[in-house]
Image: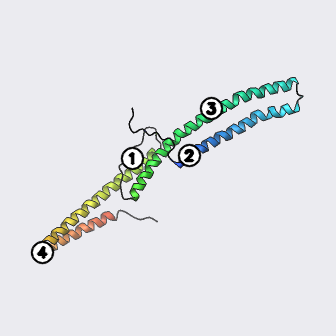
Amino acid sequence: MIPNRRRTYLIDKLQHGFILLCISYVCFFLVVLGVVLFAPLVFGLRGDAAFSPAAVQKADSLLYLHSTFWPAALFALVAIALHAVRTSHRVVGPLYRHRLVFQALARGRIQAPIHLRQGDYLVQATSELNAMLESLRLRVSEIQQDYHRQLEQLEKLRATGDHAPKEEIAEGLAALSEAAHLLAVKLDHFRFDR
């Protein structure tokens, strides 16, 4: 038994639209093909005498086409609909995971890299998103570490307070100022585009 296997096949409204689009293409193709195959026979029957050999032959052809075309058309429609579900799942599944990452980022949480299933599409987009997440994780981690070091330095300065010589306080303030400058440089990496 495979653990954590997803059993939901339609996971997003985008998937519904994609499947309906595929089915509508197939239906359009079947209607055009049906008109091309059946219309000449139907109109030919109207022009011939009721029991003439030509009318009987056209009626036999029409009945044969009717009995073979529509089951084959229904089979093709079902097969293409099932394939559309499978194919759309390979696109919408990664998009769904991307959306979860974006929602987590909006809440201030940096997710772990996304792992696609074998056969999923959007491999390049997922790779780029994972690179962005890793870069963001690294930069935010560095900024957090710098921030905590600055807090420690500030607490040391507060603890020494009035008891420390002015030179020691000046050195501590200089170190704190330098750390704040380095933190500002790291924060300047982030830009806000319009």
Q: Nearer the viewer, residue 20 or 186?
A: 20
CA gap between label 2 and label 1 equals 24 Å
Residue assigned mark 3? 75
Residue 130 in the image, given as x and y percentages of width and height: 38, 49
- Classify mark 2: residues with Cα within 10 Å, few (<14), some (14-19) or many (20+): some
Earlier in the chain: of badge 3 and badge 2, it is 2
Query: What's under tag 2, amino acid-wise?
Result: His
Sequence order check, earlier mark of 2 and 1? 2
Which residue corresponds to mark 2? 16
Which residue corresponds to the image point at 56% horizontal and 39% vertical from the top-left? Answer: 84
Q: Nearer the viewer, residue 62 or 193?
A: 62
Q: Dot 4 surroundings within 10 Å: few (below 14), some, or many (20 or more)?
A: few
Judge the density around disc 1: few (<14), some (14-19), many (≥20) Cα neighbours within 10 Å.
Answer: some
Label 2: element kind = helix
Q: Which residue is mark 4?
A: 167
> Three-letter amino acid code at disc 1?
Ile
Colour option used: rainbow
Examine the image and state in which quarter residue 160 appears: bottom left
Name the N-terminal-most of marks 1 and 4.
Answer: 1
Could you tell me the amino acid type at mark 4?
A: Glu
